[in-house]
């Protein structure tokens, strides 16, 4: 009987309403767990605290992956610096080749971190120049994207990458598919020198979009830098070709020997989609002069005169652009003359 009464009291206890008293805390439940403590932890995204026992090739690939996947700016910069050191070492350690490095790291041209972009430029300069020429078309695609980016800092840093590419593979830059006209189109978008843009036109049919997009105190310096880069690009495109020495065996070598350059028949476009004027390959100075004279010479000359009137750094850059234009159309191969 005592057992049955105890069970009834226990059941009744579940339905009793607890009487709360002022100044006293509510009674804690029987299954209460204290969660007031705090803990600290370090989370490393796809990283390792130690490199002991890891193969050098595997460690290279891990850091190459971190360059893109890491959330922290510092971690991405350090990963790019590691790749740079490995490529610059003697002998160089690059298990994925120049093609693999470029495929992974070219998207960093538009990285939001200035330090990551600066370290990326150091890595590009460490690459073997002889291995860059075969990838110029892919590199230019990302450069043109950076040149028209919304961020002024990214646009300016992209011009440094273009300068590096002109240093190591200038001829390939201006002669590859889309390398000539498409790049000039990107320069016109940066500078606002595009009379075909109807939304930003003045009454004279000339756009003033460049001044609106700069929008900072660094506007004149950024505009001068862009004009200087355009002048350098045109100088490379209008550079006279070096005469090829006559060799008696060259004729037979071209017929029977294997080509020594990658994709030697790219200009024939045997298996690609049909090219329009902008995507065409302009392999010699004369063809580049003709298409530039027909499409862009008058437009760039008008923008150059307006920049020259501003004076200062912009005016000096415009004067350098004028010298590049004049020098590019001197000689017997010039299209319609000055």
Image (cartoon, helix red, strand yellow):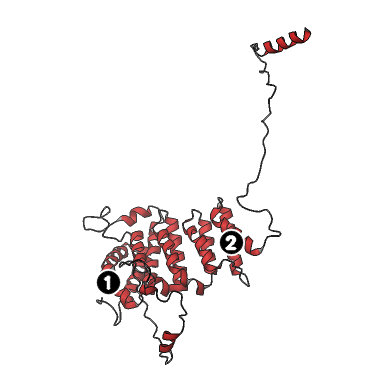
Query: Residue 239: horizontal and vertical position, in percent?
Result: 37, 77
Tag shown at residue 250: none
Viewer-side residue, 297 vs 256: 256
Label 1: few (<14), some (14–19) or many (≥20) C-alpha neighbours in 10 Å: some
Is residue 303 found left or right of 34 in the rendered image?
A: left
- Snapshot quadrant of residue 185: bottom left
**Which element carries disc 1, helix, strand or loop?**
helix
User: Is residue 66 or residue 24 the one in the foreground?
Assistant: 66
Q: In which quarter of the image is the N terminus?
A: top right
Q: Which of marks 1 and 2 is nearer the N terminus?
A: 2
* Distance of label 1 from label 2 (alpha carbons): 43 Å
The x, y position of residue 72, in whole percent, is 56, 51
Left or right, residue 183 beside residue 196: right
Q: Which residue lies furthest to the right in this view?
A: 2
Residue 315 in view here: no
* Residue 107: image location, x then y, percent: 48, 58
Residue 194 in view here: yes
The count of marks equals: 2
Q: Which residue occupies 70% across, 22% down?
A: 30
Tag 2 secondary structure: helix
Residue at 59 percent across and 69 percent down: it is 88
- Outermost residue, left direction? 203
Q: Where does label 2 land, which residue? A: 81
Determine the residue positioned at 29% across, 56% down: 208
CB-based contact (under 8 Å), mark 1 and mark 2: no
Q: Quadrant of residue 9?
A: top right
Identify the residue under disc 1: 293
Q: Is residue 137 left or right of residue 280?
A: right
């Amino acid at each position: 009987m005592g057992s049955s009464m105890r069970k009834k009291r226990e059941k009744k206890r579940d339905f009793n309403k607890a009487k709360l008293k002022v100044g006293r805390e509510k009674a804690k439940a029987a299954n209460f767990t204290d969660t007031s403590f705090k803990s600290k932890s370090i989370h490393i995204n796809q990283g390792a605290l130690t490199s002991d026992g890891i193969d050098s090739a595997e460690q290279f690939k891990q850091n190459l992956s971190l360059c893109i996947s890491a959330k922290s700016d510092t971690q991405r910069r350090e990963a790019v610096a590691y790749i740079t050191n490995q490529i610059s070492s003697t002998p160089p350690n690059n298990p994925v080749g120049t093609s693999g490095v470029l495929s992974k790291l070219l998207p960093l041209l538009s990285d939001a971190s200035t330090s990551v972009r600066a370290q990326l430029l150091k890595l590009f300069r460490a690459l073997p120049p002889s291995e860059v020429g075969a990838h110029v078309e892919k590199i230019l695609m990302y450069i043109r994207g950076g040149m028209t980016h919304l961020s002024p800092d990214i646009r300016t840093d992209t011009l440094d990458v273009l300068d590096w590419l002109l240093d190591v593979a200038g001829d390939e830059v201006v002669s590859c598919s889309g390398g000539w006209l498409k790049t000039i189109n990107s320069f016109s978008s940066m500078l606002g020198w595009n009379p075909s843009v109807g939304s930003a036109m003045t009454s004279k049919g000339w756009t003033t979009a460049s001044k609106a997009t700069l929008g900072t105190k660094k506007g004149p310096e950024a505009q001068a830098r862009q004009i200087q880069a355009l002048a350098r690009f045109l100088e490379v495109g209008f550079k006279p070709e070096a005469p090829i020495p006559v060799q008696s065996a060259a004729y037979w070598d071209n017929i029977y020997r294997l080509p020594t350059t990658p994709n030697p028949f790219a200009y024939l476009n045997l298996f690609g989609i049909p090219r329009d004027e902008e995507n065409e390959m302009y392999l010699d100075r004369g063809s580049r002069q003709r298409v530039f004279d027909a499409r862009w010479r008058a437009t760039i000359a008008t923008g150059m005169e307006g920049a020259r009137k501003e004076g200062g750094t912009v005016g000096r850059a415009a004067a350098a652009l004028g010298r590049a234009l004049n020098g590019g159309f001197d000689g017997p191969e010039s299209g319609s003359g000055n």
